[in-house]
Image: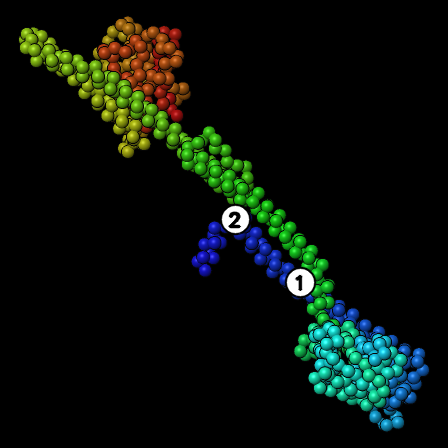
Amino acid sequence: MKRLKAFWSKRSIATRLTALFAVFLVLGGLVCLLPMCKLAERYHAEIQFTQTRDANDYTAAKLSELGYAREQLPSPGTEAYWQLRSALLYDTWNELTALTYYDPANGETIYCPPRILLDATTADGPAIDVDIGLFPIEDIIAICRNLTESGTDLAELTAYGMQIGKNFFPTRIVHADGRVFQSTIPVPEQATCVPTAAVGIEYNDLEALAFGLRVLRQYGPMNTPSEQPIFPPHGIDYAADYQDIRLTAETGYQVATIRTYSLSTCIWQSVRIPLFLFIALFALSLWLLHRQIRRTVTQPLWETTRQARLVSTLQFDEFSPDTDRGDEIGQLNRALADMAGDLHARWDSERDLEDRRQQFVAAASHDLKTPLALIGGYAEAIAQDISPEENARYLAAIEQETGRMNSLVREMLDYTRLDRTGELEHRTATDLSALIHSLVDEYAPLLEHRRLTVDIASGVHIRGDETLLRRAFGCLLENAAKYSPEGGRVAVVLRRSGGALFTVENDCDPIPESELPRLFEMFYRGDKARSRAGGHGLGLAITQKILALHGLTCHAENTKTGVRFCVTRR
C-alpha cells in the first residue's frame, strides 16, 4: 500500500486527474452498458421467438401443401412415415422442429423428433444425408462428437439402414472400436454408408444441441400452446414456440420448434459498435482531458514554479507571473507576486542599507583617520622632549582632536541606534511651540549678530519624545546660525496648519540643486563645509531619522537670498 501511495504521489496532477476521470468514466460506461445489454437481450429474445413462430407456421403450411390431413398422419415405421420425414422435417442443429400428432389407428400420441443430418457416402460413391434424429440423445451427441473432433472419416463409422432418394435412415451405426448405436424405430437394413461429417455442427455446439433435443423431448407432446419463449434454468439460451393446431381433442397435430442460440454472441453483435464508439470516445476524452489539464493546470503550475525559482534566486527583473487568472492558480500567482514585491523591497532596502553601511564605514574611517594621524604626530613630538610651551600646545591639540573623535563616535552611535529603531517606545504630548521658544533662547548667543525673525504659533502639540525633538529642531537652528553670515537674516516659523509645520531660513550662498537631496545623507558635507572646522556630516542625517520616527520629514530648498529647511507632516 505504501508503494502504491508513493507511486501515486509521484505522478503529475494531469495524470492523476485523468486516471480518476477514467475510473468514473468506466463506471459510468458500465452503468450505461448494463441496461443496453438488457435491452439487447430482450430484443434478440423477441427475434428468436419470432423466428421459431415463423418456423412453426412454415411447417404447418408445408403439411397442408403436401396434402397430409390432420387425422391421417402416418404411423411410425411405415413407408409414409419415412416419406414424411424426407419431405418435411429438415432442420439445422440450432433450429429443431418436432411434430406431435394423434394416431387414431393405435390410439396414441406420436412424437416425431427433429432430423439431425450427417454427410455420408454410399458404397458406389454418391453423397447422401443420414438422418440420426431417431437415435437416443446420448448416441446422437456421441456420434456427432466422433465426427466433429476428427473432422474427417477417421472416426470409421458405418451406418446400416434404408435409403430413400438422397435420404438415409439408419437403424444402427457401428464404430470401428465395436460400439453400436441403435435407432429407437427399427429400419430395414437395405443399404450401408459411411458418415463423414455432422452437417453444420461444431464441437462447441454439442451442448446446445443436446439441450435442444431434451427440451423438445420433454415439451414436445404438449397439449397447451406456449406464447412466450422458454429459458432454461442452467443458462443455455434458447427460444421455443409451440403451435397447437388440433382440430378436435382426439385428432390433429402440434408443431414445436426450438431455436438454440448464443445470447452472449447476439448481445455482443448488438453492443460491439456502440462499445467501440464508447472506447474511441473514451480514449479521445481522456486525451482531451489530459491535454486540457496540462494546459490549464499543470503548465501554469510549472510556470509558477519557474517564477518562484526566479524569486528564490532574486531575479526580480525576469519575474512576471500571470496574475490575471481568476482561479486558484491566479490567487497563488498574486500571493507570489505580493511576496516577491515584499522580498524585492526588503532586498533593495538591505542593499541600500549595506551601501550606506559601507559609506558609513568609509566616511567614519576618513573622519577618524585625520585626528588619529594628528594625535599620533603630536604624541611623537611630545616623546622627543620638546619645550614646555610646545608640549602644552601639543597636549591641547591632542585634547581637541580627542574631543572631536568623541563627538564623532557619539553621533555615529546615535545614528546607528536610531537606524535600528522601528518606532518610538515612549510617546508623550509635547508642546512644540514652547520647545521652539526654548531652543531660540538657547541658541541666542549664536544668533546674536544675525537679524532674527520669529513667528511661532501657540498651542502646537505633537506626540513624541521631547528629547529627540529638541535635538532635531536644535540641529536645524544651529545650522541656520552657523552658515549664515554676520548680519544675515534668520527666520523661524512654526504654523498650526497649512503648508509646512516648521521652517527655518537663513541668508547664505545657494546650494547646488543636485546636492540638496544629499544633505541628509551620512557624512555628506558640501564642498564649502568640508573643513575641519565644520561638523561631521551626521547632524542632518540624525535629524531626518528623528523626524521620521515622529511621522515628519524634512527637505531643503534654495530661496532668492539663501536656503530654507522645511519640516512637514507625511
Location of residue 76 with respect to 524 vertically, above or below: below
Q: Residues within 10 Å of mark 1 (few under 14, many from 20)?
A: some
Nearer the observer, 147 or 303: 147
Give how far across and how far down residue 33 sits, in percent: 66, 63
Q: Within the image, what quadrant is residue 198 found in?
A: bottom right
Give how far across and how far down residue 7 sits, in percent: 47, 54
Residue at (56% x, 45% y) in the render = 294
Tag 2–tag 1 contact (CB < 8 Å): no
Q: Is residue 501 left or right of residue 134?
A: left
Nearer the observer, 384 or 498: 384
**Which quadrant: the N terminus?**
bottom left
The label shown at residue 417 is none
**Which quadrant: the C terminus?**
top left
Q: Is residue 473 left or right of residue 187?
A: left
Give how far across and how far down residue 268 sits, in percent: 70, 64
Amino acid type at mark 1:
Leu
Q: Residues within 10 Å of mark 2 (few under 14, many from 20)?
A: some
Which residue has dot 1 on it?
33
Distance in Å between CA atoms under marks 2 and 1: 29 Å
Residue at (88% x, 93% y) in the render = 104
Does the image show residue 501? no
- In what element is the residue under mark 2? helix
Does the image show residue 415? yes
- In what element is the residue under mark 1? helix
Residue at (31% x, 10% y) in the render = 527
Amino acid type at mark 2:
Ile
Q: Is residue 569 left or right of residue 275?
A: left
Residue at (61% x, 49% y) in the render = 287
Which residue has dot 2 on it?
13
Give how far across and how far down residue 405 sits, in percent: 19, 19
Q: Is residue 398 left or right of residue 324?
A: left
